[in-house]
Image (cartoon, rainbow, N blue to C red):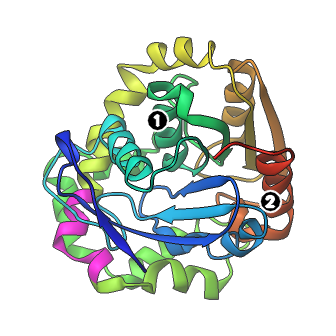
Amino acid sequence: MPSLQLRGGEVDGLSLHYLVEGRGPAVILVHGLGGFAESWRHNVPALADVATVYALDLPGFGRSAKPRTRYGLTYFARALHGFVEAMGLSRVSLVGHSLGGAVAVTYTLTHPTRVERLALVSAAVPGFGYEMSWTYRLAATIGVGEALALVGCARVYKAAVARCFHRPVPAEVDFLVESNYGERAGAPARAAYLATLRHVRPDFVDHADNYRRALATLDLPVLCVHGRQDPVVPAVHCWNVAEGVPRGRVRFVEDCGHFPQIEQPAVVNGWLRQFLVGRPAPR
């Protein structure tokens, strides 16, 4: 798995790990909270037939650097822009899952000329009424989150991840938790996770109206893919987001929870291939 160091501004010197496969228009896959590049393993090969696919570990997650910083959506978007610049990509299409959808939206709003298409998979987007569950809010509480982190273990993490599926598949849950477990569950990773919970909340609360107004002017195709039985981000949120952008479309996945790209990969891959490279796209 290659890595690169970003240059310039707030993310100067930041090390990011990533995957790359395929040839064609550039597509970047952005994971959600607690995710990592390899969590797209069911999707990269299918998309790599028609595109150059990049999947990266966002800062604070996977094997990327985990600095002590403010992990807000703007920070993640700056890191994503640094990645785009470092890879020499003029235009890209973005696919964001869960919180990665909010990161992809933030990047698109701040660099609209660099994004050709945007796909949101079970995404949480500021400005459309999404509220973190009481468990996330509790974990974000100063002191409480640190105490909970001390008792965290693979068994606890697996139970939490399994609840995000409509019908949990043990092998998938094990993979999402056990992959690079030491690095992803160590003290720096736990600190980055808690910081993300705390620092993205103002984006969803204080800046919600700004996001909604900005997205109403977004002039590019947006595909919203959502599990009908998503227990993390309600399906109605997907409807609200699609109606809030001028060129939004919705595709619901039946018998599916919060991980459509894992629970129903064949269906989702088909939709993404058609949407992302249905016509020639500039690189």
Label 1 neighbour load within 10 Å: few <14, some 14-19, many 20+: many
Q: Measuring 25% from the left and 67% from the top, which residue is drawn there?
A: 189
The vertical placement of 196 against 262, above or below, is above
- Residue 112 picture quarter: top right
Q: Measuring 86% from the left and 51% from the top, which residue is drawn there?
A: 274
Which numbered disc covers residue 107?
Answer: 1
**Which amino acid, mark 2?**
Val
Q: Could you tell whether 103 is left or right of 11 in the image? A: right
Residue to which mark 2 is pinned = 268
Distance in Å between CA atoms under marks 1 and 2: 23 Å
Q: Could you tell whether 135 is left or right of 27 in the image? A: left
**Which amino acid, mark 1?**
Tyr
Q: Could you tell whether 104 is left or right of 219 in the image? A: left
Q: Which residues are magenta?
A: 183-192
The percent position of residue 25, horizontal first and vertical second, equals 68, 53
Label 2 neighbour load within 10 Å: few <14, some 14-19, many 20+: many
Q: Secondary structure at mark 2?
A: helix
Q: Measuring 50% from the left and 25% from the top, which residue is drawn there?
A: 109
